[in-house]
Amino acid sequence: MDPDSVPQEITTLVGREVYSNNGVFVGEVEDLRLDLDRQDVTGLALHQLNRELFSGEVDASRGVIIPYRWVQAVGDVVIVNSIVERLTGPADEDEEEVAA
């Protein structure tokens, strides 16, 4: 069986560092947001944030939740779209889940 097709426990994401696809540190996964009806991960709750990315936008003690659709790869670290580097706050209702 292909090891990539073996289901992993979602708890294995907790504690992993998150980087943009440009190599910029974003934060560390603290928890996950789940949609229990769809049995799907919808977001990653991050803490230990990169203060340069989130200064003035988010209270550092609270963290953020980024949409799981931004995740490009999961391995030893989590890689997300570089859009997180341009994050200035929720632009519309679709982005509502970004600021926690």
Image: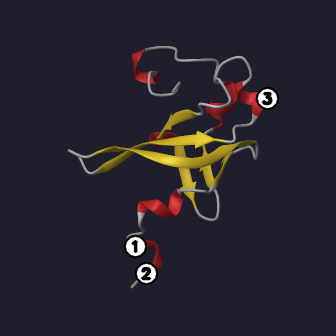
Q: Residue 13 at what x, y percent from top left?
A: 52, 58
As drawn, the label of residue 61 is none
The residue where tag 2 is placed is 2
Disc nearest the viewer among 3 and 2: 3
As drawn, the label of residue 52 is 3
Q: How is the image coloured?
A: secondary structure
Specify the farthest residue to the front. Answer: 61
Specify the farthest residue to the left. Answer: 37
Q: Residue 92 at what x, y percent from top left?
A: 45, 14
Q: Are marks 1 and 3 in contact (CB under 8 Å)?
A: no
Tell me the residue at 51%/27% (across/down). Answer: 100
Q: Are marks 2 and 1 in contact (CB under 8 Å)?
A: yes
As drawn, the label of residue 5 is 1
Seen in the image, is 38 located left or right of residue 29? Answer: left
* Amino acid type indicated by mark 3: Glu
Question: At numbered mark 1, what does the secondary structure look like: helix, strand or loop?
Answer: helix
Depicted 12 relative to depicted 87: above or below: below
- Which quadrant holds residue 5? bottom left
Disc nearest the viewer among 1 and 3: 3
